[in-house]
Image (cartoon, rainbow, N blue to C red):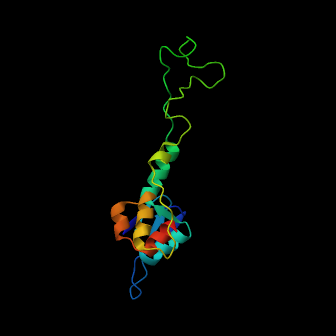
């Protein structure tokens, strides 16, 4: 079963069989749920859930803040503040942490396969998008299309 973070305010998961008395489990927004099959496809399609690994990656990307740079002793205007009067501070052109997004250089660029493409291509694309390789190996093409298609 795949784990998802619930984005909807709530979801009532039916846990009883058709011949049994009706039973369900109520999940609230932000809960981690394990779902498969028709529920998984439906909730993904309407945007009520997102994969847990993807949610964790998003939260770390949005919460990351660049570390403030400490000026070197031989740089700056002598006051140790690092501001050269234009509000920009001291900038080193050789510094790799500038305006570049560090994730851009590490992410593979794999083109999204056609919906009729082979499952291997969809698995490769899913892994490039941050999906767990072991889970991608077990996923069907329909599952991967529901997630990334």
Q: Residue lying at the far right in this picture: please name it.
A: 86
The image quadrant of residue 140 is bottom left
- Using the rendered image of the protein, determine whether residue 137 is visible from the camera's viewpoint: yes
The image quadrant of residue 4 is bottom left
Point out the image quarter for the N terminus. bottom left
Left or right placement of residue 59 versus residue 133 in this view: right
Left or right placement of residue 140 versus residue 70 in this view: left
- Residue 13 in percent (x, y) is at 45, 73
- Number of numbered discs on residues: 0
114 over 18 or under it: above or below = above
- Using the rendered image of the protein, determine whether residue 4 is visible from the camera's viewpoint: no
Left or right placement of residue 47 versus residue 124 in this view: right
The residue lying at 52 percent from left, 69 percent from top is 149
3 over 91 or under it: above or below = below
The residue lying at 34 percent from left, 70 percent from top is 138
14 over 49 or under it: above or below = below
Q: Residue lying at the far bottom in this picture: please name it.
A: 19
The residue lying at 35 percent from left, 67 percent from top is 137
| 83 and 21: which is toward the camera | 83
- Residue 84 in percent (x, y) is at 62, 18
Q: Residue lying at the far top in this picture: please name it.
A: 78
| 111 and 8: which is toward the camera | 111
């Amino acid at each position: 079963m795949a784990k998802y973070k619930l984005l909807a305010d709530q979801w009532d998961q039916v846990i009883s069989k058709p011949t049994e008395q009706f039973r369900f489990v109520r999940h609230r927004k932000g809960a981690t749920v394990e779902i498969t099959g028709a529920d998984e496809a439906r909730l993904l399609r309407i945007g009520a859930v997102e994969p847990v690994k993807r949610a964790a990656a998003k939260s770390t990307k949005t919460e990351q803040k660049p570390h403030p740079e400490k000026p070197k002793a031989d740089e700056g205007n002598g006051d140790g503040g690092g501001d050269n009067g234009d509000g920009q501070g001291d900038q080193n052109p050789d510094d790799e942490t500038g305006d570049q997004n560090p994730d851009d250089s590490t992410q593979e660029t794999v083109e999204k396969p056609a919906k009729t493409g082979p499952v291997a291509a969809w698995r490769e694309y899913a892994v490039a998008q941050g999906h767990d390789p072991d889970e991608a190996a077990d996923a069907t093409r329909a599952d991967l299309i529901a997630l990334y298609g």
